[in-house]
Amino acid sequence: MNISTLKQTAKAMIAPGKGILAADESAGTIKKRLEKINVQSNPDTNLVYRKMLFTTPGIEEFISGVILYDETIRQSISTEQGKSNKIPVPQYLTDKGILPGIKVDQGKAEMVNSPGEHITKGLDGLRDRLVEYRNMGAKFAKWRAVIAIGADIPTDASIKANAKALAEYASFCQEQDIVPIVEPEVLMDGKHDLQKCQEVTTKTLKMVFDELKNHEVILEGMLLKPNMVISGKESSVQASSKEIAQATIETFLRVVPREVPGIVFLSGGQTPDEATENLKEINLIGGPWQLSFSYGRALQEETLKAWAGKEENVAAAQRTFLERCKKVSVARSAR
């Protein structure tokens, strides 16, 4: 483990005005997204879409890193000189000044005897996979754990099991000089209010950092990718952006160590405008960490619609994508 390398990479990932593009949709998720614009998903069409994102002129001004899926990190992009001249995706991003990363979890499985709760899979063979990904150029990785709020859930057992898996993943990453993004997501799904989300987020983050400490994870060489403290989608009372920001910062000041260099928020089902506005309000309050973003759908939703799977729409879709990246960058720099 090279602690200096980990710190340098983490610092680059949260460079001022920049954030992370989550382009690590699983095969099932990208299939659903492309189907909405009447495009059939397969490795070739998936790459066409992602290439459009990655080759957008100027995104390196606002995007510090891209989280890739296993399929994508193994693919290559044809350059302007011709289809015969192909560059591996990680190398293309690196040449553009963008750090390549990789999603390493393998989805979720239902917890035994706990309906509605899940544990993230992927620890088996992870050490070997991380060596391979490092050799392919990955500089950071991501592992997502989901915590649902509902009747009698989440249980302490569920939170602890996911926290332990996150910590084990993070320690494996740092062995290979790969910066781990630790992503415990308290889901927006449900009728719970802001206070309930704050309560569950506080408990979840406390358990996560307890486990990270137990596994001797170097906090300065990792990033946290949490949910914002936000009302459930079906709640009768929806908190304002200012209330979300206040509750989020209050929560993190209680449980997130100052040694963590940056927090890269997930958008978690928010609209692009909501995710942008909430990030702005969070940064207006501020904290001891860099407060950035690691958005997937919130950066891509408008672009998908503008593209609609048509070659003649690529330029317009790229302009749409760049504009959203700019807006989120401004929000991230609001302080």
Image (cartoon, helix red, strand yellow):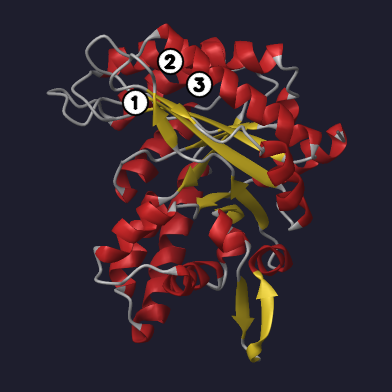
Q: Which residue was labeled with disc 3?
A: 162
- Residue 28 shown left or right of residue 325 in the figure: left
Q: What element carries label 1?
A: helix
Q: Which of the pair 48/61 is nearer the observer? A: 48
Q: Is mark 3 on a helix, strand or loop?
A: helix
The residue positioned 79% from the left and 41% from the top of the image is: 8
Residue 110 position in % (x across, y down): 37, 26
The residue positioned 42% from the left and 17% from the top of the image is: 201
Q: Measured along the vertical axis of the image, is residue 329 above or below residue 221?
A: below
Nearest-to-viewer mark from 1 and 3: 3
Q: Which residue type carries mark 2?
A: Ser
Q: Which of the pair 255/45 is nearer the observer? A: 45
Q: Mark 3 and mark 2 in contact (Cβ < 8 Å)?
A: yes
Label 1: how many residues lie within 10 Å, few (<14), some (14-19) or many (20+)?
many
Q: Distance between the residues labelled 2 and 3?
A: 6 Å
Residue 244: mark: 1
Residue 150 position in % (x across, y down): 24, 17
Q: Mark 3 and mark 1 in contact (Cβ < 8 Å)?
A: no
Q: Which residue was labeled with disc 2?
A: 158
Q: Measured along the vertical axis of the image, is residue 27 above or below residue 77?
A: above
Residue 131: mark: none
Q: How far apart are marks 2 and 1 (CA)?
A: 25 Å
